Image (spheres, coloured by chain):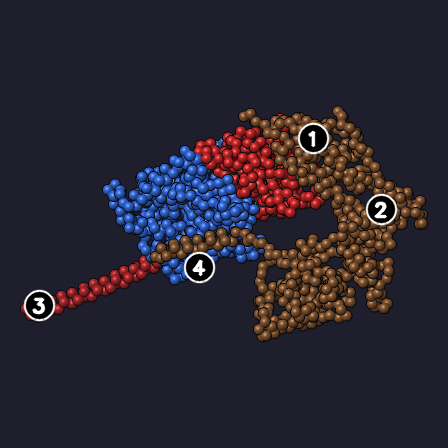
Chain colours: A blue, B red, C brown
Amino acid sequence: MSETAAGISAPARSRLLTPFNLVSAVILIGGAVILAIRFTKGLAATTNLSHTNPWGLWIGFDVMSGVALAAGGFVTSSAVYLFGMKEYRPIVRPALLTGFLGYFLVVLGLLADLGRPWRLPYPFIRQAGPTSPLFEVALCVALYLTVLFIETTPAAFEWLGWKRWRKLVGSMTIGLTILGVILPTMHQSTLGALYMVTPTKLHPLWYSAHIPVHFFVSAVAGGLAMVIVEGMVSHRAFHHQVQISSEQFESINFGLAKAASVTLAMYFAVKTVALALENEWHLLGSAWGLWYLLEIVGFVLLPCLLFAVGYRERRLTLVRVAAVITAVGIMLNRFNVTFIAFNWRIPAELRYVPSWMEIWVTVAFITFAVVTFRWAANRMPIMYEHPDWKGAH
Amino acid sequence: MTVTRRGLLLGTAGALAARSVGAGTVEHFEGYPGRYGLLHDTTLCVGCRSCEVACKEVNGLPPFEGEAIGDRSAFDTTRRTTDTTLTIVNQYRDAADGAPPVYRKLQCMHCNEPCCAAVCPVHAFSKTPEGPVLYDAEVCMGCRYCITACPYYALAYEYDNPLTPRVMRCTMCYPRIKEGLDPACAEVCPVGAISFGEREQLLQVARERIRKFPDRYIDHIFGEHEFGGTSWLILAGIPFEQMELLPGVTHESLPSIGTSYLGVVPLVITIYPGLLAGFYAFSKRKERLANEEQEAAVAAALERAGEDSRQKLAAAADKARTDQERAVQQAVQRALVEQQKKETGS
Amino acid sequence: MARPAFASTLLGSMLLAFAATAWGATPPTASLRPIPPSTVVMVFPEALGPMQRPAVEFDHARHAAAMDKEGCTACHTMTDRVLDPRLSGTADVAGRDPLIDAYHEACTGCHEERVASSLKGGPVTCGGCHARLGPGVSQRVEMRFDASLHARHSLAFEDKCENCHHVYDEQLQKTKYEKGKEEACGPCHGPVDVERTLSLANASHRRCVSCHLERARAQLAGGPVQCAGCHDAEQRQAIQRLEVIPRLQRGQPDTTWISAPDATSQVVGFDHAKHEPLASSCSGCHHQTLKPCRECHALAGTAEGGLVTLAQAYHMSPAEPSCVGCHAARSSQPECAGCHRALALPPGEAACAVCHSGPLASSLGEDAPPPVLRPVELAALPAFSDGFPETVVIDRIADRYQASTLPHAKIVARLDASVRSSALATRFHGTIETLCSGCHHHSPAGTRPPACRSCHAERAEATLDKPGLVVAYHRQCVGCHLAMGIAKQGCTDCHAAKEVQS
């Protein structure tokens, strides 16, 4: 991706056939074809979902992991606007845009996965099921997507030159940010709480009365990690637009690393408490226990230490590696809860493995998000400050 | 409705203790009186699968293709209910040492407090006073959370249907029950392994059977209390764990375990705005104080700078004056000397 | 940055973890290894406690065959022509470690000697004897003396009971013979040695095997000397049985009244002579001692009677030593089980009167004469008529299958024949009508009992646990066929299928 960044700086029309564009086009067209099959032949033709495993990759990645990894938006915006940490201002807009696209990806994933996606608004307009955690998730995600959308409009309005609109949304920043913390707090935790109703189906090492807390804390860590990863990629791709110095950028990353290290340590502690609470130590000796330890030690404890060392020694590479490991670890945790450690009692032949079409569609959604990010960043003041609005937000 | 009442009554207390339901409520709903249930005596089931066929007929589902009745190879694998077969019979033990083989019929258990109803975001399920749990395909959006939640793997989905897929499950033949008939499986079973009647009375019948034949039955009625109890009561002669049932689970219902957490949502909505606004206010206050400090420092520095320059100006003015005076004096001196020279020289 | 290396490490570790999960998820399969009857699994939990190494499985038959020339005294001590079944040198060794050393000396010592003299010997290493063989199940069956075997021994000893039977004189501290006090071995000789009382295994091996060895050495016909001869199931079955077993004479009555002190109801007249051949041996009913039941079991439970009251002792089903228990066991045999199986007939109270038909306990004096018990005469079956049909056409509900023709006469005749052939059945049935109640249940026995459809509606009455008509037919008919081992058990065996109109 880095080598094609040069192709983006020139006017888009003359350099349309870059390798990146070609590959993305193939992926996106393929995804569209698969979705067409899904809506003409049914989910059976395009997924490996079964009556035993109703939730697969599209829920496990697109919804669960997507929401967790898009948490960087509220983390950074609350840091800058609510806790006054102004030095992180340069990364707020990219993080919010990533967040918005991430949540949009969630909705896309839902539209593909739901049996009747046109009925997605039914809980709000037709009949509500307010006892359902999923109702709460739907409501929160819908509201939060709106909030994120509004939070990304300042850049668009600056680009379009609509000063009055820009002033209007600018005045809503604090309110939106507060909402933007309340809503994710709820739905990040509730995504975990979805599984509180399955104590016999989710393996006891992952099941806990505190699952909502586990999901929320890991989402914060995942969000921070994604901000670092996204920054790593877009800083290089849009290097020509970036106005801050590399020292400033590095120090932002180290600050994020410090926060991520603390969050991961907290997550590790909370998970240990869960083990102790249910006295599940003996389960660590089983095969599932090994798998669990891999997730906790390799993808939580290890990046926690890497973040701390990277921060102290001022080694950006370590921080970036830790961020990648953390992001993968969050995905692994969500996959575990959704279809690996879920249904752990069923025989091997009934277990779920994603089909290539599910994987392709997921990759297509991610590609769509990346392409949209690139389109926006190439036009709107995401990676830099608009001269008319310097220091205004 | 049981579920909604619980969900809304839980509130504060339920939020603080992640699981407990009793903490905030003092009432206990025993269930609709006179509701129906079914007693499945697995010691009587001979695995003829007439119930599967009758269920398909009554529900208008396509008949069996590969696994015809009488084809014992259907018992080679552990089957699950599907979108076209709402109930199935599995074999859980071969005939051995003179003991007959053991079978069990699987279908929706029509729980007293169904978790499918509690977790559906469009409230597509409802627990009827007669006992069956009903599903409304008119509002279902196909999220399949119900299938994920069901601990008995009783629900199936029409994955082959692209535009109008439904969740498929046993309905306890609700229309037939309303007409006063028995569910199709209970009516057709040739050995009476399924009895239909009022749940409370069936419990008595089950207890009486256990009392009369203690060597035949495990002394436990599955479904009496598990996860709050189910409408299907099961008697067994072999341990329930060997029939894919978990008799040791909590008596607390799954909705109270799984949805009581939602009580925390109103707390977040009410506390967070103030808390976060407070953080914002504190950070703004810090900023303001920092700004004021900075301004004061700048002003002081400016003042000192001003003082400094004034002094310098005064000193320069003095010097200039002194210089000027000296210059004037020197000029006068020179003029005087010139005058003197003129007076003496001419 | 090291992205490719990182990615591959990640992938590798995930694959590894998946493999671990799959391996951990497969259940272990265990099949038990059979241990032959002549192999002794040397486990001594009381003497040795928990052990580090697996128990030694000692193949006695192999050793006996290998040491045939040296004879039994190579390993066992012989005192007064009685062979001590314990390995010599290990008897009466106190303490765990000395006992282990004794065994090691005896076994490994002998093995080492033989190897040294270039003979085939056993293992000399620890693991050779203490081998890890996995879980096994012993095929040894307990030896039991039955009436036939006892009679053969009596004949061989010409009824000189003192050859085997003795009592223990507490004062003289030794065993002696007392006529009329012969008992089974079990009541005194328990499972383990208790001080000077030998365990049953110890005592019986000394008494029996020594005698058999002597006779074998004297070339006389005798019992087995190999373990398998008594303890192998097949060889046990092959032991010759007497065609006619002479009655064991120990002064027992032919008939007797069964009553108890303080009992108030009608006493039971008991035909002891007729019951003797029905039990496997005297110990079948007199399970501890040959004394009458009431001597240990009082009306209220006593410690001596194991807290079993007298009423329980006589009536406790399914225990074999009890009257009712044994009768219940008889009625659950295939010939009777069709009617007497679990779900069909609970025991009725009319059955009590069959036994309790004697005079009142109060009017029975101490020296009353023994009862005279006459056999019951069952009336002949009546002729078949409209009221007593030969066949019955069952076509009440005929939707999936054709009507079925019930061979009523054939069924009744067969059941009647098996009742008449059993004295127990005849006495308890008493009248012909009782037979009808086997199928025509929950109704008064009479000459014209109700048909199934009279009481069973098409629909079940679940609250009464009363099945509907179809279920009633199937449970009654097929249930009986299953219990009696009759071949007609499939659907079309009784009613042909119908072409289903779709």
Q: Secondary structure at mark 1?
A: loop
Find residue A347 and report its horizontal and vertical position in percent.
52, 47
The residue wearing badge 2 is C271
Q: Give amino acid for label 2.
A: Asp
The residue wearing badge 4 is A305
Q: CA distance from mark 2 to mark 3?
A: 189 Å
Please tell me how crowded label 2 is: few (under 14), some (14-19), or many (20+) other residues with Cα within 10 Å: some
Q: CA distance from mark 4 to mark 2?
A: 90 Å
Q: Secondary structure at mark 3?
A: helix
Q: Give amino acid for label 4.
A: Leu
Q: Nearer the viewer, residue A237 or B56?
A: B56
The residue wearing badge 1 is C407
Q: Secondary structure at mark 2?
A: strand
Q: Nearer the viewer, residue C173 or C70?
A: C70
Q: Residue furthest left?
A: B346
Query: Which mark lies nearer to you, 1 or 4?
Result: 1
Q: Secondary structure at mark 4?
A: helix
Q: For the C terminus of chain B, give its image quadrant.
A: bottom left
